[in-house]
Image: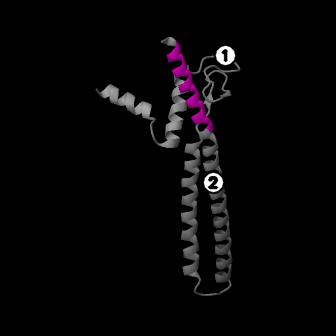
Amino acid sequence: MDFFKGIGDRAKEFSGRAKEATRRPTELLELTKLRYEVTKLYKVMENNKEAVGELVYRQFKGELGLEAEIERLLQNTKKVESDIINIEQQIEALQPKPLVCPRCEVELPSGGIYCYKCGIQVGTKEEAEQQDDNTAKKETGSESSEEKNDKKDEQK
């Protein structure tokens, strides 16, 4: 019986690694799209500021009736700045904070249990596995059927 349990455990481990392998490219693609969108918005904001400057200069020279266009460009620029902040927050949420060793303050790889520089234990195997599971859930927005069944069993 232990033999089959071992095979089942290995299958679960393999499945988890397979999910992680497919999650990373998807996450990278999403990050790339968001960063591209931020770049486009910065260009729009730059163009708006340049146009506002041109209109203010023309107004300074005596041209009339530019106030409405200046106000429209300023409001648009304010909205673009807000959009940039929102997208940058999305990018931040997709990029988990790296684990840092409390002793030597070295950035550690995801899922690490020990610091590779000083050897101090910074986590447990269970914490590393749970972190990987939580990241996968956040990516898909759902639980596996096995986890749903476990919850049903607990409720009974």
Give the residues drawn in magenta, as a range.
3-21
Tell me the amino acid under the disc marked 1: Gly
Q: Residues within 10 Å of mark 2 (few under 14, many from 20)?
A: few
| Above or below, 88 relative to 119 | below
Q: Is residue 131 magenta?
A: no
Residue to which mark 1 is pinned:
119
Q: Nearer the viewer, residue 87 or 129?
A: 129
Q: Kindly state the secondary structure of the residue where label 2 is placed.
A: helix
Tell me the amino acid under the disc marked 2: Lys
Q: Nearer the viewer, residue 118 or 94?
A: 94
Residue to which mark 2 is pinned:
33
User: What residue is shown at x 65% (from left), y 87% (from top)?
Assistant: 62
Residues at badges 1 and 2 in contact (C-beta under 8 Å)?
Answer: no
Percent from the top left, x then y, of residue 67?
56, 80
User: Which mark's residue is nearer the viewer, 1 or 2?
Assistant: 2
Q: Quadrant of residue 25?
A: top right
For the C terminus, the image quarter is top left
State which tag comes first along the sequence, 1 or 2.
Answer: 2
